[in-house]
Image (spheres, helix red, strand yellow):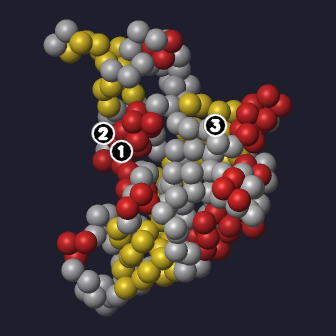
Amino acid sequence: MAINKIITAEEAVAGVKDGMTIMIGGFLGTGTPECIIDALVAKGVKDLTVIANDGGLPVGAYDAKTARGVGKLLEKGMIKHIIASHVGMNPLIGDGMIAGTLECTLVPQGTLAEKIRAANYGLGGVLTPTGVSTPMEVEKDELGRDKQVLELNGRKYLLEMPLHADYAFCRASVADTFGNFYCAKATKNFNYVMAGAADHTFIATEKLVQVGDVDPDIWDVPGVVVEGIVEGEPVWQI
């Protein structure tokens, strides 16, 4: 019997509770599952730890009438701690840090992606030269874990530990009813590494097809890591 994972956006966020850690795909709103974000806002959970590339965009950015991506959660004060690599486009993050209502941990973008990938693929960590001979050597990481410096073949590396979440919310351009999916162009960004790096992965897709309707070679992410699929994600102008 065919497996059908179609659910509503409300069902996708039903299990998210106050204080949980969630991953959100996208890059300044490009590739973010907006309909799932909207359902989270409506649910009203708080004290979230959000792992994302950035803080989305505030109202008014690029003439937007509403906030975009993670910016919607920041606007409602739903985030306690954001772990990201680029936050300069959303002044709400700086405001929250100054007010003491928001913790922000910056992680180099490549390191952030690799830490998420390590959790996704079951790796014990990743070695990177980024941060060697800087304060990153002695600072604790985003979860309060000590850093280690290892030397291999005469070169020093930081051991960066995996970054895992309770929920990962990703966006697809096309998906089938089992959850196999791919993302077009710039929407790939963090969606591919995040899908599978959490206890639960849900996607929102622009287009839905039946299993077998398209050449399976187009799929970049296997549906086995996807728990549920939300239809009707608006087409994003890249």
Q: Is residue 112 above or below residue 46?
A: above
User: CB atoms at circles 1 and 2 under 8 Å apart?
Assistant: yes
Residue that carries the numbered disc 2 in the rendered image: 123
Residue that carries the numbered disc 1 in the rendered image: 117
Q: Amino acid at mark 3?
A: Gly
Return the disc, 1 or 3, that comes first in the chain's sequence.
Answer: 3
Classify mark 3: residues with Cα within 10 Å, few (<14), some (14-19) or many (20+).
few
Measuring 39% from the left and 75% from the top, which residue is drawn there? 174
Where is residue 96? Give x, y as percent: 77, 36
Classify mark 1: residues with Cα within 10 Å, few (<14), some (14-19) or many (20+).
many
Return the disc, 1 or 2, that comes first in the chain's sequence.
Answer: 1
User: Marks 1/3: CA distance?
Assistant: 24 Å
Q: Is residue 168 above or below residue 53?
A: below
Quadrant, the N terminus: bottom left
Find the residue positioned furthest to the right.
Answer: 99
Q: Is residue 195 visible?
A: no
Q: Is residue 72 above or below residue 202?
A: above
Q: Is residue 80 above or below residue 171?
A: above
Q: Say which element carries label 3.
A: loop
Q: Toward the viewer: 125 or 58?
A: 58
User: CB atoms at circles 2 and 3 under 8 Å apart?
Assistant: no
Where is residue 18? Give x, y as percent: 71, 52
Q: Amino acid at mark 2?
A: Leu
Residue that carries the numbered disc 3 in the rendered image: 88
